[in-house]
Image: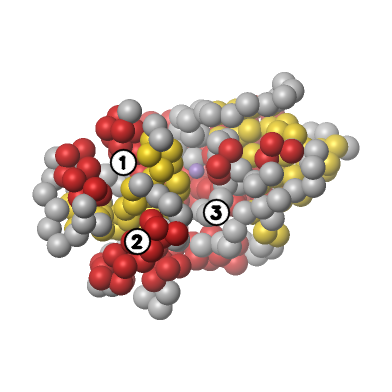
Amino acid sequence: MIDISVVGHKVPDTDCVLSAIIASDYLSKKWYNPTVYMQGELNKETEFLLEQLNLAKPEIKTTFESGTKMCLVDHNEDFQAPDNISDLEIAWVIDHHKINFQTATPIYARVEPICSTGSILYKMYKEAGFEVTKEIWTMMLACILSDSLLFRSATTTKEDTVLAKELQEITGIQDLEAFAMPMFNAKSDLWDMEVEKLIKYDYKEFDFNGTKAWIGTLETTNPGYALWRKEEILKWLEKIKKDDNLDFILLSVVDIIWEKNTSIILDGKETEVVEQVFSTKINDNLADLKNRLSRKKQVVPELTKYFS
Ligand SMILES: [Mn+2]
C-alpha cells in the first residue's frame, strides 16, 4: 500500500471537501493508503452536510512533509495547492478547472469540463465497478448540486443532469429542491458573520497577465445579509487590496434563488474596468452583473480577455 495525501483547494467549498473524501475512498480500493486533508475551515454548507452524513471533519493542513505523494482534487494550479507544492510529489489530479500545472514524473490525471469534481468521481466509480456506500453516492449528488447551484449555474452541462438523475435513482432522493435548499440555507446563514470573514468566505486570486486580482463570491439565498453591510465591505475591500498588494478586487453577491449577481465595486480602477467589461453602469458602488452566477465561466473569462 502506498501512502497518499488527498486534498482540495484553498478556501474549501463543498465540492472540494466531499470530493477529497470520495477520492480517498476510491484510492483505498486501489493500492493506496490515503489520508484526507483540507486547506482551511469548512464553510457552513459543507459543515451542514458532514453533520447530516455523520462524517468526520478532515484535518486542516497546508504544508506537507517534503516528498509526500499527493492527490489534488478540484484544483491543479500552484496557487490553489498546498504552500510547498513544489517539494511534493503530485501523483493524482482529479479536477474540472483549466489546467496549469507541471510534474516531474508521469501521473494519473482526470480532468473534465463538467460541473463538479463529484461528477467526475461518479464516472470513475462506474468505470471501475467499485462498490459504493449510500453516503458516497449522496456526497456525489451534493457536489453536483452545490457546484451547479441546483443546475442554475452556467457551469452545468447536459451530462451533469444525466448523472444527477442516475444518482437520484441510486440514493432514492426524489426531491432535489428539498435536498438542496437546506444546504443553500446553511451556506447563507451569514447575518452574524464578521465582515472580513464574510468577504473571504469564497474567494480566488488570479493573475490576469500581470494584473493581480482577487474575486470573492457569496452565493446566498439572502443577499441582504451582505448588501446591507456594503459600506463596511467597501472599507474591507480597500484594506485587503492594500494588504495583499492587489491591482483589482471585487465581491459578487450571488442571489441563488433569483439568479442575480450584484457585485460590490470600489471607486476608481475597478469601476472603470467593470463598466467596460460588463457594459454596465455602476451606481453607489453596486454593479448589476445580471445572471452571471458562475465566477469560473462568466466573470473570469471576460476579465482575462480584457487584461490580456
Ligand atoms: Mn468544484
Q: Residue at x 57, y 47 (%)?
A: 9
Q: Residue at x 33, y 28 (%)?
A: 308
Residue 155: horizontal and vertical position, in percent?
38, 37
Of the image marks 2 and 1, the number of the one nearer the N terminus: 2
**Direction from residue 304 to residue 160 in the image, left or right:** right
Of the image marks 1 and 3, the number of the one nearer the N terminus: 3
Q: Is residue 223 above or below residue 102?
A: below
Residue 285: horizontal and vertical position, in percent?
19, 59
- Marking on residue 299: 1
Q: Is mark 2 within 8 Å of ligand 1?
A: no
Q: Given the image, on which type of amino acid does mark 3 rest? A: Pro
Which one is nearer the viewer's eye here, 72 or 154?
72
Mark 1 → mark 3, Cα distance in angstroms: 20 Å
Residue 256 shows up from this direction = no
The residue under label 2 is 237
The residue under label 3 is 12
Residue 278: horizontal and vertical position, in percent?
19, 40
Q: Given the image, on which type of amino acid does mark 2 rest? A: Leu
